[in-house]
Image (cartoon, rainbow, N blue to C red):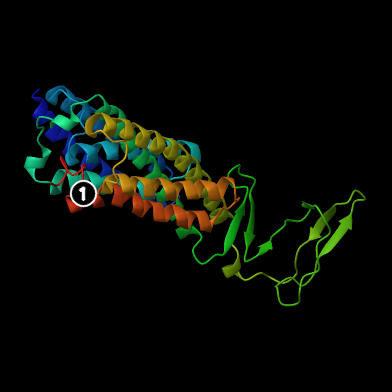
């Protein structure tokens, strides 16, 4: 089969499969009783991932170089990375909501590459001299994989913000899944739960009217009853939403923890390549500057989680900001048509 014809067939097939997969995930979210949608969604993502991998492989054979030299190729490589990271995240979280947020983004990227870019930008062309280097595979592929992981992690953080909208909660230990949480400043304890000190009598206006505790003689207290006054539903999450929120917070943290080292390695590899090609490790090119900003945003996210102990909405907002920054770094700066990284994209 002609490799060009195969590529044209595969890019359209990838878009169609991702579109159907997106609908499957959305139907599954709207009708949770349809358990078959989870398996269909996972299968759709896996098939799309395989189609895109075959597309990139055919393009590699046809052009004779690693397919990351123009916008069309990088968009499909990014989509491949997102679907791959999605499969990892979904396998670890066992939540169909992962696909609800990742499938539309993957489909949108594939649609942009297939249906929007002019045909002249989809054709393989000889590499410009600066790209004729083994560093093309090392630097660009690692950067694209880091973008994929950071985007998926940020999307899950955005999903967490949606699930917990209107709730002032702080998860406790969600990174290891211990299940504690705070709602509006109160730690809600179940009957029989051990606390390290006897509970402090609450004020009259905080929603708690009565509590009982039994001292067990070893400096701890057992909470036997929590309240006789119902807590307004707006103040707490349902157990199902709480479990989902903890899962999203946990897997988002882990996926971003995967993407950040890749971003670091990619930036270092880019510096080495820049010195080889242009005689300088760092030149404050717009792409380099925004790569540094992206690194700082996600470094701040991980610092807040690991060192400061932040969990819940605060770091999720930081990760959501990182989603925008990644897109500016990957695509936005190329709209300027300036700098050493402008070739092979829009200009």
Instruction: Give the quadrant of the N terminus.
Output: top left
Q: Is the residue 306 above or below the residue 58 in the image?
A: below
- Report x, y in % for residue 223: 80, 57
Q: Nearer the viewer, residue 256 or 21?
A: 256
- Report x, y in % for residue 309: 61, 50
Left or right: 199 with respect to 295? right
Left or right: 32 with respect to 245? left
Q: Quadrant of residue 77?
A: top left
Q: Residue at x 69, y 60 (%)?
A: 188
Residue at the extreme front: 279
Q: Residue at x 8, y 24 (%)?
A: 2
Q: Nearer the viewer, residue 81 or 5?
A: 81
Q: Residue at x 34, y 31 (%)?
A: 269
- Report x, y in % for residue 313: 52, 58
Residue at the extreme right: 217
Q: Is the residue 254 above or below the residue 273 in the image?
A: below
Task: Indicate the secondary structure of the residue bearing disc 1.
Answer: helix
Left or right: 189 with respect to 297? right
Q: Which residue is mark 1?
A: 334
Q: Is residue 182 visible?
A: yes
Residue at the extreme bottom: 205
Q: Nearer the viewer, residue 235 or 269?
A: 269
Q: Is residue 46 visible?
A: no
- Report x, y in % for residue 197: 82, 56
């Amino acid at each position: 089969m002609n490799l060009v014809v195969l590529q044209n067939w595969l890019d359209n097939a990838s878009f169609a499969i991702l579109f159907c997969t997106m609908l499957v995930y959305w139907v599954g979210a709207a009708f949770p009783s349809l358990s078959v949608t989870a398996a269909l969604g996972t299968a759709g993502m896996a098939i799309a991932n395989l189609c895109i991998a075959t597309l990139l492989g055919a393009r590699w054979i046809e052009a004779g170089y690693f397919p990351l030299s123009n916008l069309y190729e990088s968009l499909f490589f990014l989509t491949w990375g997102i679907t791959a990271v999605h499969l990892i995240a979904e396998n670890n979280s066992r939540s169909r909501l992962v696909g609800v947020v990742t499938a539309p983004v993957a489909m949108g990227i594939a649609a942009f590459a297939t249906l929007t870019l002019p045909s002249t930008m989809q054709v393989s062309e000889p590499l410009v001299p600066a790209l004729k280097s083994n560093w093309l595979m090392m630097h660009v592929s690692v950067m694209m994989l880091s973008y994929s992981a950071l985007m998926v992690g940020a999307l899950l953080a955005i999903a967490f913000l949606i699930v917990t909208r209107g709730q002032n909660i702080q998860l406790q230990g969600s990174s290891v899944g211990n299940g504690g949480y705070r709602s509006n400043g109160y730690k809600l304890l179940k009957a029989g739960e051990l606390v390290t000190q006897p509970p402090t009598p609450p004020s009259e206006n905080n929603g708690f009217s009565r509590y009982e505790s039994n001292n067990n003689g070893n400096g701890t207290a057992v909470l036997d009853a929590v309240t006789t006054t119902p807590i307004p539903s707006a103040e707490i999450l349902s157990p199902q939403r709480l479990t989902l929120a903890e899962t999203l917070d946990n897997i988002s943290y882990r996926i971003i923890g995967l993407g950040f080292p890749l971003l670091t390695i990619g930036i270092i590899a880019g510096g080495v390549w820049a010195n080889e090609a242009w005689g300088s490790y760092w030149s404050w090119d717009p792409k380099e500057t925004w790569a540094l900003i992206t690194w700082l945003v996600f470094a701040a996210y991980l610092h807040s989680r690991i060192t400061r102990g932040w969990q819940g909405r605060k770091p999720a907002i930081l990760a959501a900001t990182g989603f925008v920054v990644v897109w500016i770094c990957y695509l936005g700066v190329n709209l300027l048509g300036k700098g050493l990284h402008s070739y092979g994209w829009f200009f």
